[in-house]
Image (spheres, coloured by chain):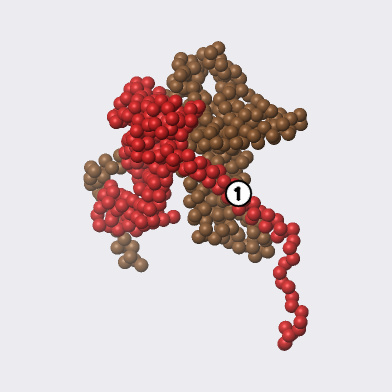
Chain colours: A red, B brown
């Protein structure tokens, strides 16, 4: 039985063949695809931080918007910061409760009904409606009758957020185990009570983080605001009437300006906007990690 | 066994009806509220179609079939939408040609190559792409990217000038703000969504198929070709269509880098225009038929994207259902 005592060691490794080389090439191509995406992302973030960080200061975040010809060290983006915060907040207040209720209908009441299937399908389709069309829509049903206002902008942003909130909340509600619902029914609770006091709290972590991601998305949108708030350069603290402004629409206006000062303020506003979106995203991750009980 | 069936509370007939009649008012109210919120989605979609078409009606009625003519000149009262439809199609195709292989590659990398603990950070990084707002891509595109890539266009253009097909596509004239620049920026912007959807589809491939392919001695790439790809083909097509819808409707980034010139040309490095960006750039100053025309472009855009999204969702759902059934 001592065959292995012989000198010959059989090399079981396959010799490099075309098949293995091809496998290697394809793996390298996949890694390359990832690198290819990293390059522009790194490039954009680097440019925004490099050009924006030098101009951002407390004075920049609160100062008034000067005429485009003035150099970068004059004024700031105060009205745009105020506008973005109030318009996004108003849109959130409108879209999140409605979106959560819509998802409650889809998951708790709809079941396999045709209507629920249609609503679910159309809500997914609605996420694909271009943001500029939402702007035109609010322009024709609201702005033509009531004039430009922060509220009109918030309505347009709310229409964009609604389907996103419905989808993310629906996914979270589906994860809540039926045993929780059945346990509460067994104690004699009504369906509304079970939904509000048992199902929604069980899914609250996921719902909040989904809503925050929708807010982050809406805060960066420009197209729906162009024809609804009419970009102005003065502070408007009344979100319900009068033309308003926002960081994205101000960046859009400054990007096509030939003046260096205006462009520098544009970079500062871009950094502010990205910072807001990042903070919302990080808070969403934190909420998911800390409060989400059921994860996919 | 018989004791169990007797003890089943769902058994006795009639009691369920009595329960439903005693439903408290708040319970009913909540259900109606939830239903109303769900119906709101349908209402908004219908309202979008009705209100924008109403505003665009004077364009449709005065121009008739000329809405698809190729000349757009507000000063001469010519409002043909063809240059913008053409530009939308060209930029979207450029974006897809670049974004789809990359996105599918990353999706395969995440699902089939890297270990799980590495894939999460990679997903975070891809998601960062989606967090950068459209207008920031536009700002970077027009102030940094376009001036830089203009030199590359210039040398490619003079290189291929005179060669039959290539000369027509990539020859001079060249400009930093062009169809191609817009296509590239759109490609960056649709990569995250195409990646994440493809990843979801690829993740549904049963492990037993993969293991079977490996057991037959396949390399990883052969396993992907033989086991993963046939399974996820349909879903990836759906993901690509959703990416197409995004690329067609993306406004602000394209508006800044496309060059704003309503021309139909085969030169990809020449300035052009597409539907969302002409609305964004000119709606503010427009009135009368001009405004109705821009509104009409919005109606067309809405119709195109709705059709593409409905088809895409149907494709995704059909392939998901087939996989569950199989």
Which residue is located at x 50 percent, y 27 percent? A258
- Residue B30 in sight here: yes
Which percent across, then down, holds residue A122? 45, 38
Q: Is residue B47 above or below residue B188?
A: above
Look at the image and tell me in which quarter the C terminus of chain B lies: bottom right
- Residue B234 in sight here: no
Which residue is located at x 67 percent, y 32 percent? B154
Badge 1 sits on which subunit? A
Q: Is residue A296 above or below residue A169?
A: below
Indicate the secondary structure of the residue bearing disc 1.
helix
Q: Is residue A163 left or right of residue A14?
A: left
| Quadrant in which residue B226 is drawn | bottom right
Return the residue at label 1: A33
Which percent across, then down, holds residue B75? 53, 13
Give the farthest residue toward the bottom: A1
Which percent across, then down, holds residue B122? 52, 53
Q: Residues within 10 Å of mark 1 (few under 14, many from 20)?
A: many
| Residue A16 vs residue B56, the one in the foreground | A16
Q: Is residue A13 above or below residue A147?
A: below
Which percent across, then down, holds residue A139? 40, 25
């Amino acid at each position: 039985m001592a065959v292995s005592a012989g000198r010959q060691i059989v090399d079981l490794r396959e010799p490099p063949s075309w098949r293995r080389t091809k496998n290697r090439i394809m793996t390298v191509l996949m890694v390359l695809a990832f690198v290819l995406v990293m390059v522009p992302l790194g490039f954009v973030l680097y440019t925004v931080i490099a050009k924006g960080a030098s101009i951002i200061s407390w004075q920049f975040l609160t100062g008034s918007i000067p005429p485009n010809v003035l150099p970068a060290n004059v004024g700031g983006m105060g009205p745009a910061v105020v506008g973005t915060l109030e318009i996004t907040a108003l849109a959130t207040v409108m879209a999140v409760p409605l979106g959560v209720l819509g998802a409650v209908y889809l998951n708790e009441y709809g079941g396999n009904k045709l209507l629920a299937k249609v609503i679910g399908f159309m809500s997914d389709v609605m996420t694909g409606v271009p943001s500029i069309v939402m702007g035109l829509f609010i322009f024709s049903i609201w702005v033509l009758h009531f004039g430009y206002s922060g509220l009109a902008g918030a309505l347009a942003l709310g229409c964009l957020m609604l389907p996103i909130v419905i989808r993310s909340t629906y996914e979270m509600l589906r994860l809540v185990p039926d045993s929780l619902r059945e346990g509460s029914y067994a104690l004699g609770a009504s369906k509304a009570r079970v939904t509000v006091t048992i199902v929604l709290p069980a899914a609250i972590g996921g719902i909040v983080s989904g809503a925050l991601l929708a807010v982050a998305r809406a805060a960066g949108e420009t197209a729906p605001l162009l024809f609804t708030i009419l970009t102005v350069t003065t502070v408007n603290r009344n979100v319900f009437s009068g033309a308003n402004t926002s960081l994205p629409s101000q960046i859009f206006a400054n990007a096509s300006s030939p003046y260096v000062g205006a462009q520098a303020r544009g970079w500062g506003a871009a950094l502010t906007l990205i910072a807001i979106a990042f903070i919302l995203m990080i808070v969403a991750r934190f909420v998911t990690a800390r409060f989400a009980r059921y994860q996919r | 066994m018989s004791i169990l069936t007797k003890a089943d509370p769902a058994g006795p007939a009639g009691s369920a009806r009595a329960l439903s009649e005693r439903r408290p008012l708040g319970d009913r109210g909540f259900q109606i509220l939830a239903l109303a919120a769900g119906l709101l989605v349908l209402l908004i979609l219908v309202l979008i179609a009705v209100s924008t078409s109403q505003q665009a009606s004077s364009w449709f009625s005065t121009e008739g079939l000329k809405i698809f003519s190729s000349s757009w000149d507000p000063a001469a009262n010519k409002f043909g939408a063809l240059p913008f439809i053409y530009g939308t199609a060209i930029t979207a195709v450029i974006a897809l040609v670049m974004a789809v292989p990359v996105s599918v590659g990353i999706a395969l990398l995440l699902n089939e190559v890297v270990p799980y603990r590495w894939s999460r950070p990679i997903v975070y990084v891809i998601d960062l792409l989606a967090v950068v707002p459209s207008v920031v891509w536009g700002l970077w595109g027009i102030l940094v990217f376009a001036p830089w890539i203009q030199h590359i266009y210039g040398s490619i253009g003079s290189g291929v000038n005179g060669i039959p097909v290539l000369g027509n596509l990539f020859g001079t004239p060249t400009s930093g703000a062009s169809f191609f620049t817009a296509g590239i920026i759109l490609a960056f912007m649709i990569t995250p969504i195409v990646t994440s959807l493809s990843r979801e589809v690829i993740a549904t491939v049963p492990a037993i198929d993969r293991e079977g392919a490996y057991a037959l001695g396949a390399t990883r790439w052969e396993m992907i070709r033989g086991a993963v790809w046939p399974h996820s083909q349909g879903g990836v097509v759906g993901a690509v269509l959703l990416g197409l819808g995004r690329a067609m409707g993306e406004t602000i980034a394209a508006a800044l880098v496309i060059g704003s010139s309503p021309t139909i040309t085969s030169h990809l490095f020449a300035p052009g225009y597409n539907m969302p960006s002409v609305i964004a750039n000119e709606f503010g100053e427009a009135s009368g038929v001009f405004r109705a025309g821009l509104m009409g472009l919005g109606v067309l855009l809405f119709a195109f994207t709705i059709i593409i999204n409905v088809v895409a969702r149907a494709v995704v759902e059909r392939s998901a259902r087939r996989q569950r059934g199989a």
